[in-house]
Image: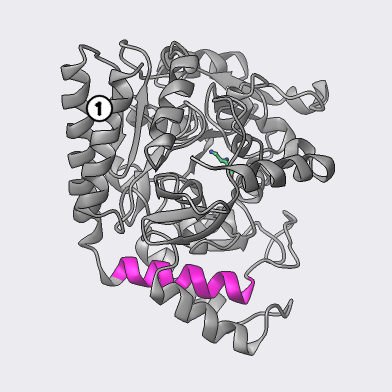
Amino acid sequence: MKTEKSKQLFEEAKKYIPGGVNSPVRAFKSVGGDPLFIKKGLGSKFWDVDGNEYIDYIGSWGPHLFGHNPPFIIDALKSAIENGTSFGAPTEIEVEMAKLITELVPSVEMVRMVNSGTEATMSTVRAARGYTGKEKFIKFEGCYHGHADYFLIKAGSGALTLGVPTSPGVTKGNAADTLLADYNDIASIKKLISSNKNEIAAVIIEPIAGNMGVVKVKDKFIKELRAICDEEKIVLIFDEVMTGFRVAAGGAQEILGIKPDLSTYGKIIGGGLPVGAFGGKREIMEKIAPSGPVYQAGTLSGNPLAMAAGYAALKYIKNNPGIYNELEEKSAFLENGFNENLKAVGKNYAMNRVGSMMCMFFTENLVDDFKSAVKSDTSLYGKYFHEMLNRGIYLAPAQFEALFVSTAHSKEDLDKTIRAHKESLERM
Ligand code: HOZ
């Protein structure tokens, strides 16, 4: 595989951009080698600057539910751009977008658009603090909620993969109000609540974690968590940046049958453009400025291009509910193929999947929390990643991430991927 142009660009990039990338996981640091620079994408595939073709399973880390450049999103963008790129004043499509989100997700009675998942999660914690008058909040080890200071404590995703789950630059003061619980362990929650009585504003969780690999909450755990939050007047926040509109139109909360008080979104709701959103119970959301005192703002919030792309994506989801069956079938086919291959090579690696989010962990133990996830052999993942890449399959360049299947993946793509998986395992 020729990668000269990517290599040259990376050398140049490193002179001007920290680590040569605008987001750490992209740099291939945890799998070794140099990142590929991508030139264009279409459907299930993208091409790098050297002309190599890949079947893409990161889909821009989640947004591309329909693959790259679906015509209905491109058309929406083309007509929106004719009218202008940003006004900093309200537009009609923001109202349409908010209505559509509240229609698709019953727990979201009001919604505020922002520009990224990080902004969304930051704003929910502020809203919960403003609403409850309490300051502390609980997050779970291995869950990632973007890069606001007080979230970068035992965080997942790039923070975990690059060995800095607790980031320098986060002050003691900033970390002091973040309490850490163990995923899927209700006893750890009870302990924190009893030692911080009436001090906890919120619990934030990825109900289907995608940033320590894919790990789902247990039904009993999440039901108990909901009940405890109600009893203690703690705001329950579901971080659905990854799972929102991906695992079901109503996200993880639809699958789990649990209504959080607040939810956060990103990725799919931007149709590939930079967008985030947070929403939930009216009485909490009305605390947000200007209807309430909790300040939150943004020059490009509700940007007309981002709204046009995101609205087109959500409208497509609303009008085509069958896509979730299609995604389930495709993803189950891939998972079964992977499992058959594992049997054939005598391995029993943990395979976690919820709908079109999947992860193969290089450990034979059950993975149901952070501690079991980090038992994975990340150097083996690195080898596997490169074997797959050499066969034209682009996976997340890190073990603790998700593989995303899109509606654009064809039977041929999936067959090719399963064959590549077998050959890769055989060579390891
Ligand atoms: N936060 C993303 C992984 N969970 C990475 C985003 C990116 O590098 O584009």
Q: In this rendering, would 314 be left or right of 189? A: left
Q: Main secondary structure of the magenta part?
A: helix
Q: Position of residue 206 (x, y in %)?
A: 46, 36
Circle 1 is placed at which residue position?
Answer: 422
* 388 w.r.t. 383: above or below: below
Res 346 quadrant in image: top left
Q: Position of residue 253 (x, y in %)?
A: 35, 45
Confirm whether the magenta stretch covers residue 305.
yes
Q: Magenta region: which residues?
A: 303-318
Query: Residue 252, located in which quarter of the rendered image?
Result: top left
Question: In the rendered view, does 221 fall on the left or right side of 196?
Answer: left
Q: Is residue 256 above or below residue 409?
A: above
Residue 309 magenta = yes
Q: Secondary structure at mark 1?
A: helix
- Quarter of the image with the C terminus is top left
Place of residue 136 in the rendered image (x, y in percent of width and height, measured from the top left): 67, 29
Tell me the kind of residue under disc 1: Lys
